Image (spheres, rainbow, N blue to C red):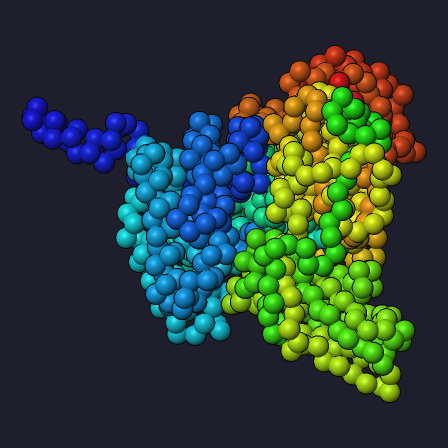
Amino acid sequence: MRRNQIVLVLVWVMGICATTLLCATVDYDHRALLIDGKRRVLISGSIHYPRSTPEMWPDLIQKSKDGGLDVIETYVFWNQHEPVRGQYNFEGKNDLVRFVKAVAAAGLYVHLRIGPYVCAEWNYGGFPLWLHFIPGIKFRTDNEPFKAEMKRFTAKIVDMMKQEKLYASQGGPIILSQIENEYGNIDGPYGAAGKSYINWAASMATSLDTGVPWVMCQQADAPDPIINTCNGFYCDQFTPNSNKKPKMWTENWTGWFLLFGGATPRRPVEDIAFAVARFFQRGGTFQNYYMYHGGTNFDRTSGGPFIATSYDYDAPIDEYGIIRQPKWGHLKDLHKAIKLCEEALIATDPTISSPGPKLEVAVYKTGDKCAAFLANDNDNSDATVKFNGNSYQLPAWSVSILPDCKNVVLNTAKINSASMISSFTTESSKADTSLEASTSGWSWISEPVGISKADSFAKIGLVEQINTTADRSDYLWYSLSVDLQDDAGSQAVLHVESLGHALHAFINGKLAGSSQGNGNKRALDVDIPITLVAGKNTIDLLSLTVGLQNYGSFFDIWGAGITGPVILKGLKNGNTVDLSSQKWTYQVGLKGEDLGLSSGSSGQWNSQSTLPKNQPFIWYKTNFAAPSGSNPVAIDFTGMGKGEAWVNGQSIGRYWPTNAAPNGVCSDSCNYRGPYTSTKCQTNCGKPSQTLYHVPRSWLKPDGNILVLFEESGGDPTKISFGTKQVASLCAHISDSHLPPVEMWNSDTKSGKKVGPVLSLKCPHQDQVISSIKFASYGTPLGTCGDYYHGRCSSNKAMSIVQKACIGSSSCSVGVSTDTFGDPCKGVAKSLAVEAICT
Ligand code: GAL
């Protein structure tokens, strides 16, 4: 090349890549995403930035990297960023640029799912409420006002990323973007307009010129060049809509979301690993865990209705940022196993055959590269598969991965990873009496029943709630005065019908009854027995939303609140009075909300008189010292009813410890074999859905923290406790039929020497060491972590051997074989179980 040609090329490259020459091209073909022309196998995980804090992000991202992720996937939350039309917020946990840069700093890629509809169990699916009030607007369809706003916000985010040079094409980490979200699941009722909307969304996104591909999930008709991707518990059966597009899985649900009033979902890692391996076995090359870290629905961000404040999701990293074992560790092993196959996987399509019922062998072979996946889809019978002249044992519902088409590196049902039990340790709530709190540690203000604010208004008939409150508050008062001369002292029934989500009815200032919906049924239809007085009777109905609907066709206009009818029944002479068309007085929100009580600094807080307990509508305040140490902090709200809580002015979300999971929908033991559904392995039946509420460490000072609660149904705040979440025990249970650790695979197969199974333990924090061994047994130990016991056969050397290998170290490994322990029972299959404590 001549000198001026070189200069020209350089100028061209710099023109696109600005100051850096590290920019990458991202493209795709039938097999995979191509980064700089090379096909890649990519493992991704979702972390939603507003569900944690900027202080937590680097650690969460590092734990994701350590777990074997290449990509972090996040939605962009429109209503966080533009709460008021034209007024943007990219501060604190909404600092999207900082989040993307934190991912880049760890050397990972980003998949930016702009939506801007996101679902995500997020209030109103991520739409700002003001959008609803634009004249003539219709959401998610071929509607000009909607498309204009969607385009404006999408372009704003794209421009922001471009300005910061965050696209891979500019040297940044973003390799992929998503437009819309699962529209294909609900587009039927939108008809032809839905179809043209999707075509518009595709060309609008493409026109923004990000330099990286766009995807649409669950959108079989996604137009070129948009890649249609799969969401679900399993996506091995999925094929994209063109042979030119790769097979991608944007949401592999690692658990499920928690509802107030629901049991706690749990998805066993053996099943997740099975689903992932099946996906790669059948030609997949990009897979994302939804969620990898779920986090917390702070504020009133949870959607719903009835989505709980915890968004833990049973994810590989728990709500508090602690790795969940063995989920995190087993998936980490799985990722290493899949990466050992990468060169073979990206080179060709698999050749698939079935050696028997529900058995499947897939081989990726080109030249000297060969990788194989052997699957047993039977949900109750183990199988032996012959492959290339060798026999392989396959447990039911498992996949074995052979990176060289000969040796098994991992079987999805055999967990080598350690497991952990985490616990909540209470600190006696060192109430800080140096500040204004009373001797009980609590001060209070009562919230008036009924209309108390100057901005109340009257209207004929019953109004829909969301149109009235614009979601400025969960609460809307409906108030009416009725004169019932003839019915004095009579027992009657107040019949109320509401679109949801919950209701408290007061007659003459006294609570007469309450009702609430649930995750399956939002609407209310109640008959409340009441007593009327002679003359004027006041009816105050408080209607409340518990997170706005985030999913479904036309979900934005499903509505909430008491749309009626409201009827007085069972009056004297069997009379009935329909109150629906009366002139009602309305009040949006609470007096305490207007006064800014949540910060704790304003208002006349009572601290001298007796603390009211178990009474509705009380604002409570106390000061507290942060629990010592650096472990994540939680508040246990046992004893309280329902409300919202603020720490130093920051909302930690809605609390509702009295809303319990039903009985009969849980299973003590969870069989991972067979297709998973979100209700399959639930726990916590009959208990409150959520008692612990996360308070990010960075929101706390050592002392003098202010906790404010608004208690709506009645509770005893003196029962509240503060504490920390930590790993209590570290366990592992490895049998002599387990495979050697994945990291031994290379040396193992090269040297031809067979390493046996190994039990490995590692303390969760670098500065911790294993201080004691609570249990060790080699032979036929039984039980589960925290609850192991000796079986009929046990070596009497196990405890001392494990102690010697582990105590005083932050990690240790012990070979699981008779070479280490001798043979306590010849001819019997043996295993080693250990429970250790780190301090
Ligand atoms: C999907 C949706 C996600 C999330 C998930 C359930 O349908 O795309 O945003 O809502 O379901 O957790």
The part of the image, by quadrant, that contains residue 413 is top right
Q: Residue at x 84, y 43 (%)?
A: 612
Q: Position of residue 120 (x, y in %)?
A: 55, 52
Q: Is residue 767 left or right of residue 156?
A: right
Q: Nearer the viewer, residue 680 or 480?
A: 480
Taking the view exactly as shown, the residue that stands out farthest to the bottom is 573
Q: Nearer the viewer, residue 348 or 86?
A: 86
Q: Is residue 623 something one can see in this rendering?
A: yes
Q: Looking at the image, how many numbered discs can be counted on the residues? A: 0
Residue at the spot 85% in from the left edge and 37% down from the top edge: 609
**Which residue is at 40% across, 69% downward?**
136
- Residue 635 location, x and y as percent? 74, 35
Viewer-nearest residue: 388 or 437: 437
Q: At which x and y percent is residue 366? A: 40, 43
Identify which residue, 746 or 25, lies in the foreground. 25
Residue 683 shows in the view = no
Q: Quadrant of the C terminus?
A: top right
Which image quarter holds the N terminus?
top left
Q: Quadrant of residue 228?
A: bottom left
In the drawing, does residue 731 fall left or right of residue 136?
Answer: right
The picture places residue 631, in percent across and down from the top left corner, at: 69, 25
Q: Is the residue 381 above or below the residue 287 in the image?
A: below
- Residue visible at 83% across and 49% down? 615
